[in-house]
Image (tube, rainbow, N blue to C red):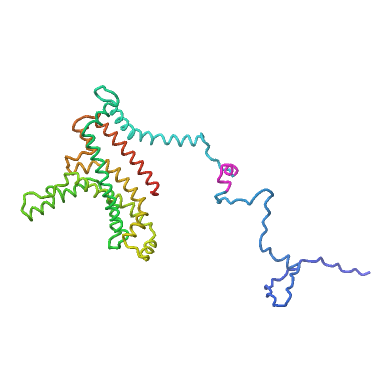
Amino acid sequence: MRDTPRRAAPTARTVPAQAAPASPGAGEPSAAPSGEARRAAPDPAPRTPPAPAGRGPRARPDDAASPRHTAAGAARGGLRLPRRGSPRTKSGGLWAVPPVALLALVFLYPLALVVQQSLSPGNGGGAFDAYASVFASQSFREALGTTVWLAVGATAGCLVLGFALALVIAFVPFPGARAVAKFIDVFLSFPSFLITLALLFIYGTVGMANGVWTDVTGAAEGPFRFLATPWGVLLAEITYFTPFVMRPLLAAFSQLDTAQLEVASGLGAGPARIVRQVILPEARPALAAGGSLVLVMCLNEFGIVLFTGAKDVTTLPMLIYGKAILESDYTAACVVAVVNIVISVGLFGLYRVVGKRAGA
């Protein structure tokens, strides 16, 4: 017998790449791909393994609800959170000791000395005898009344003038409006006595206004002498503290939607009605915050009253200066200082509450 040739082992045939067949026309049956074509074609979308039973989808690390953002998830992920009482938290508490000690030494210790001096009269009386003596004095009652009415009057004047000026700067277009707004920020850094000196140069006894009056009329003295009166102090305080009201108002007006003004104007509302019904409700929180701040600062103002030379105007800071420096009655000065601090802290707390409600 002749040897029959062995049949070669079948080899895998390479399917040549073919262009994608055109979509069959209407009425033409689409040919199903062969087995080799199905084996050679790649999987269009990788299959994801199904989630194990009882577990949800795996959270991403950057997800806010990821378990890594919790204490248990941080422990599973290898992150160690500092525990309460750990050496790291104890060292952080030690770092807070130096600034607290410095604050206590610089601020709290002198305040404690003032309170202690007010409760320790030199004549050996009771602890509150000095308070009773000061409260019964006519000078203290007059100083308290003068301080309150000057602070309230200056605050009211600053609110009215600041609101009017802020309206003009924010809603009345004129050249240099932005420069004026920037100047208000710079004005806040000026010392109070600088404004008083400027007013003295203009309205003082030998100021410019009196000089012009004497040159024109030939009189020996000018008529402008109001700076040495409570009204001069009130004018100086309004002049200096008005920008402290304008600054929050300008910030509030910058966030006001101008579409509301256009709609109100299109409906026939006049300027006064737009200000009263549209702008003023939006400005009330800023007015309250600025007015509270001005009230606190006016209660503690010393430089303006001193530089105007108003001898008949005695406020609580001026009374403290007189008792301590001129009369050497340190106990009475400390009593008045404690009263002034209590009033200021109470009003500052009111300012903080109003500022939080206003979003400041």
Which residue is painted at 29% across and 43% down in the image?
297
Q: Nearer the viewer, residue 74 or 207?
A: 207
Q: Nearer the viewer, residue 86 or 352?
A: 352
Q: Please state the horizontal and vertical placement of residue 357, each as a whole percent of the image.
A: 40, 47
State the count of labels. Answer: 0
Decide: is 305 above or below 218.
above
Query: Residue 191's spot in the image, x, y percent?
Result: 25, 46
Please, is residue 40 above or below residue 136 in the view? below
Q: Nearer the viewer, residue 182 or 260?
A: 260
As for residue 293 lying within the magenta part, the answer is no
- Percent of width and height locating residue 275: 33, 58
Which sits in the foreground, 253 or 15? 253
Q: Is residue 69 magenta?
A: yes
Farthest residue in the top direction?
Answer: 124
Residue drawn 35% across and 35% down? 103
Q: Which residues are drawn in magenta?
A: 66-76
Q: Quadrant of residue 98?
A: top left
Taking the spot 70% from the left edge, 76% from the top edge, the residue there is: 24
- In the rendering, at what x and y percent does residue 37 appear? 73, 68
Q: Work out which quarter of the rendered image holds the N terminus and state it.
A: bottom right
Which residue is painted at 25% across and 40% down in the image?
Answer: 147
- Magenta span: predominant SS is helix
